[in-house]
Structure formats: structure tokens, C-alpha cells
Image (cartoon, rainbow, N blue to C red):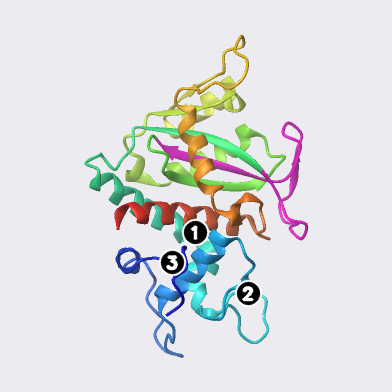
Amino acid sequence: MSKAYPSNLTRAQYEFLSEMIPEPKSGGRKREVEMWEVLNGIFYILVEGVRWRALPGDFPVWQTGGGASPAPWYIPIFAIGAKTAPGSRYTTICTSSLALSSSVMPVPRKQLSDSQSVKSAAMVYEAVGYDAGKKIKGHKRFMTVDTFGLVLRVLVTAANVPERNGGKQVLKRVKRMGDKVSRLTTIWTDGGFDGPAFMMWVMDVCRWIVQVVLRPKETQGFLLLKKRWVVERTFGWIMGCPRLVRDYELLPETSETFIYLAMIRIMVRRLA
């Protein structure tokens, strides 16, 4: 058992997530570590913002044989997650459970979409671009959330990808959720997603209506915009994790997994 780090899951929180952890494969070496400790190690990386090599020694070792990838017992939750995105599936389960516990319909009627550009670390070279509008070199996070600010789907691209192009890709992911978004009718966005071509694409492909929430031209200084503040709050939630303040991940898929993990941590703390 590791020390009582602030990022650790409680027993109740782990038991809620344990049903979603993949079972060990048949044959070969048996699983020698407690998956509770594996999850705690991943959340320590997320919350404390340290490198994998800086993982404290009381967690399961992060590598074997001098390799550069996480050890085999981290793979079912994290490394494979970067490729097959089970993090999105876990997030969907947590979102539905949280909605049911709050006596709210788990299938949303409306969603909000927005993007956030973040600087990338020096060693990151995969899908890196320059956002001329925000003067940031790095990655761009496209995110869709429900009216509670809970993440539906995330897409990480180069920062120079236009909002409408990235918006189409992330909405395709939302559309593939099937019955989970069967009641969805409206998408609220900002001015970056404005334009008749994008609106018609959403109507033709997704069968949803896009409503753009714009800032009044005569307004100066800070203004809390209706609807849009919900997704901005979600960006604030994930930026509370030092690992996500800057993009340190070599692959965009890994960045997406960390964002899902941040939301899972937020939701499981409400559920258990």
C-alpha cells in the first residue's frame, strides 16, 4: 500500500471503478500488483504533474527492462487506453451514473462545444501547430460537454486546425455514442464555429441544430456569457491538474486519455 497521497482513490471510489478495469488475459504471468495501486499511480501522475520516471517508489514500478513505456500492469488502463480510448467509455459510464444519482435523465438534450489551445513541451513533435489567433504553439483540445459540464467526447489536434474542422471530427465521435445521445437536439458554440457551411453539415450529418452564442459588440471587459460558461468551467476543472496545464504527451491520443482520466476523477469523487 502506498502512502496516503492526496491523489489516491478511496476504497469506495476504487470499488466503483473496479468493475470497468479489464480482466487479466488468460495464460502467461499472473497479475502481481493491486490495480488499486495502479490507478493511484496514474492519478498521481495526473494530479502532481510529474514524469513517469519520477513516480514514487511505493507505487508499482512504471517500467521494466529499461524501456521507455509504462510497465505491463499499467497498460490495460492507460497505454492501451491511448489507442482504443476506453477512457471515453469509462467517462460515459460515470456520467450516466452521476446523472441517475442526481435524478436527472442520463441522455442529454443539449451540449456545448468549444476549443482550447495549450502550449506543448519542447520534446513534443507529433501533431504540433501554431494557433495564430491565440499565439500558441502546441495542441488544440476540442471538447463537447453536457449542460452539467461533464465531458462527452474530446479530440486533441494540432493547434492550427480550424474550429470548424475540429468541430466536425469531435461531433462525429459524439454521434457514434448512439443511444447515449439519442435525445440530443441542440449544440451551443462560440463564434469560431459560426458559418452556414458548418451549420448545414451538422444538420445533414448529425441531425442537430447549432446555436452560436456571441459576445455583444458594445460590451467591454469581462462578461459572463449564457450557456458558454459551462464548457469554460470544464476547461478550468481539467486545468486544475498540473499534467494538463501544458501538453507533455508525445501522442494526441495520450492527451485525450489524460483528459478523460481527469473527468473520471472528478465524477468518481462525487459518486463515492
The quarter holding residue 151 reads: top left
Question: Between 155 and 197, which is closer to the camera in this rendering?
Answer: 155
Please report the residue visible at 29 percent of the width from the left and 65 percent of the height from the top.
12
Quarter placement of the N terminus: bottom left
Residue 135 covered by magenta stretch = yes
Please report the residue visible at 47 percent of the width from the left and 68 percent of the height from the top.
5
Q: Which portion, as a residue range, is magenta? A: 118-146
Kind of residue sitting beneath label 1? Ala
Q: Mark 3 sits on what residue?
A: 8
Numbered circle sitting on residue 69: 2
Lateral position of residue 15 relative to residue 254, left or right: left
Q: Secondary structure at mark 3?
A: loop
Q: Mark 1 sits on what residue?
A: 85
Quarter placement of the C terminus: bottom left
Q: Position of residue 181 (x, y in %)?
A: 36, 40
Q: Position of residue 116 (x, y in %)?
A: 61, 39
Q: Nearer the viewer, mark 2 or mark 1?
A: 2
